[in-house]
Amino acid sequence: MIDIALLRTAPELVRHVCHAKGSDVDVDKLISLDSELRSTQVHAEKLRADQKNPSLRTDIEAARALKAELQRATDKLRTLQEERDALWVRVPNLFPDDTPPGDDDEDNVELRRVGDPVPADEARAHDTIGSRLGIFDMARGAEVAGSGFYYWKGDGARLAWAIFSYAQDFLVGRGFSPMLTPLVARERTFFGTGYLPFFADQLYRIADTDLSLIGTSEQTLIGYYGDTIIDRAELPIQVTAFSPCFRTEAGAAGRSNRGGYRVHQFHKVEQIVICDPAESEHWLDECQRNVEELLTGLELPYRVVRVCLGDMGAPAYKKYDTETWFPSFGAYRETHSNTNLTDYQARRFKIRFKNADGKTVFPHTISSTGITDRAALAILENHVQPDGTIAVPKALRSYLGGQERLGAGKPAV
RNA sequence: GGUGGAGUCGCCUAGUGGCCGAGGGCGCACGCCUCGAAAGCGUGUGACGGUGCAAGCCGUCCGUGGGUUCAAAUCCCACCUCCACCGCCA
């Protein structure tokens, strides 16, 4: 959420944000609901104050009448509150003036390219390579769990573990504290992190419970601090976690995403920062630097784009995507996303801290990919050798017992 | 999963329908005292919302949400969490 005071002091700004981010929230309705809510609240509070008058103890008839009136006022208050909040929680976050306009990822603005991409080559498709080496299996994944699930096997599974360990060790070296988190969470958590109501159709809900599978450990990492007032001395909080991530990808069926690029379950090392509002731009840049150093260490060519308005999502204030070169797609494809959410999550989740002046304020949150198994797919495609094996980037060798080639031995299974 | 107990202002605690419409202690902050400190004494001590130019004022919050009542921390219902024991288990 943004500061509701903006609705009263700068309604044009709220209108502008809703329009720019394609929100269908009726701002005029919102303003009138909010205004009526407040006058009703003043009325109800006055009645409640009257109710405390000791003379009512001897005048039970008057007390009854007052009770009835107060009942009507609080009923109305509740209705108005529900109506206003239903709209308010859907108002998107603000964004800086230099945010690129646009509707989708086509309109993202490229900032830089790093590394020398190998030529586009359909034959380098990771599923083809991985299947041939016996380290990657879509077919059996579909058999067991349905379309959109796959297996890493043998050297493939070792490669996946290697990149996750590599990324986590790197981030720990950068001051991040590692966690292993719950893989399910309550609705409250998804609301607080801004995934509900905006991405409701992405959640795997667990029948007959309040729980859903997490779509990212961001949800449980930020959730850890929900409804708390953080000691200022603890900021900035830097945490990282490895977790499976579950997404229904509703609506993505039929898109050209062969192989394991877009699936219902992937694995991710996440980087999360909770910091003083004055420092969030700095930490967004720090997280971006981490992303790029991780990719450089994996010897993968990439480009960085500034994400446009239409591709950003309601909770995001500013977002960089990092896209890694996939020869089989003949394109840079998103492997990392790095977002400054400013105080949008903190407000929803009542995460606060006391600033130097002793005022209770909302911190900013940064949510950024560290590494996912999409990077492992990119390693297959970019580092495949003429003999069909995969060259292991130097940075990963210590995580693979010094091994320099993947898939050279007997295929697993 | 079963049975029993419990959740009050950072921590401990008082509390069985209206002198609690939240008291006390600890801690913390400030002041007095002191050469300085400790002790002692005094004052203060949260969150959220509304209102006002402002000092301030008003309201809400006793795990959460409902309900009973003129009136609820207190009575009723549901849920959440924790503790103990039993069962099961990596």
Image (cartoon, coloured by chain):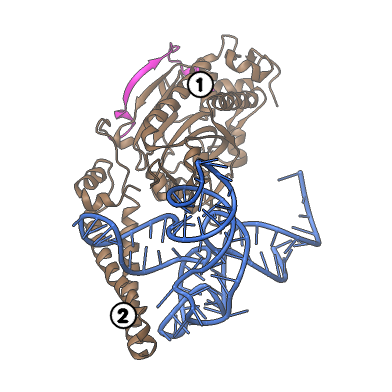
Q: Are marks 2 and 1 on the same chain?
A: yes
Which residue is nearer to you in this view: A324 or B65? B65
Q: Is residue A61 magenta?
A: no
The answer to which of A306 and A222 lies nearer the viewer is: A222
Q: Amino acid at mark 1?
A: Leu
Q: Position of residue A220 (x, y in %)?
A: 53, 44
| Residue displayed at 55% across by 14% down | A384
Looking at the rendered structure, the kind of residue marked 2 is Glu
The shade of chain A is brown
Q: Label 1 neighbourhood size at 10 Å, few (<14), some (14-19), many (20+)?
A: many
> Mark 2 or mark 1, which is nearer to you?
2
Residue A168: x %, y % from top left: 57, 28
Q: State the extent of the magenta-drawn residues as a range.
A: A103-126
Numbered mark located on residue A180 in the image: none
Colour given to chain B in the rendered image = blue
Q: Residue A332 vs residue A43: left or right?
A: right
The alpha-carbon separation of the residues under discs 2 and 1 comes to 64 Å
Disc on res. A69: 2
Residue occupied by mark 1: A294
> What chain is tagged by disc 1?
A
Q: Quadrant of residue B37?
A: top right
Mark 2 near mark 1, Cβ–Cβ under 8 Å? no
Q: Nearer the viewer, residue A134 or A32?
A: A32
Q: Position of residue A307 (x, y in %)?
A: 34, 30
**Dot 1 lies on which element?**
helix
In the displayed structure image, the side of residue A243 where residue A4 appears, left or right: left
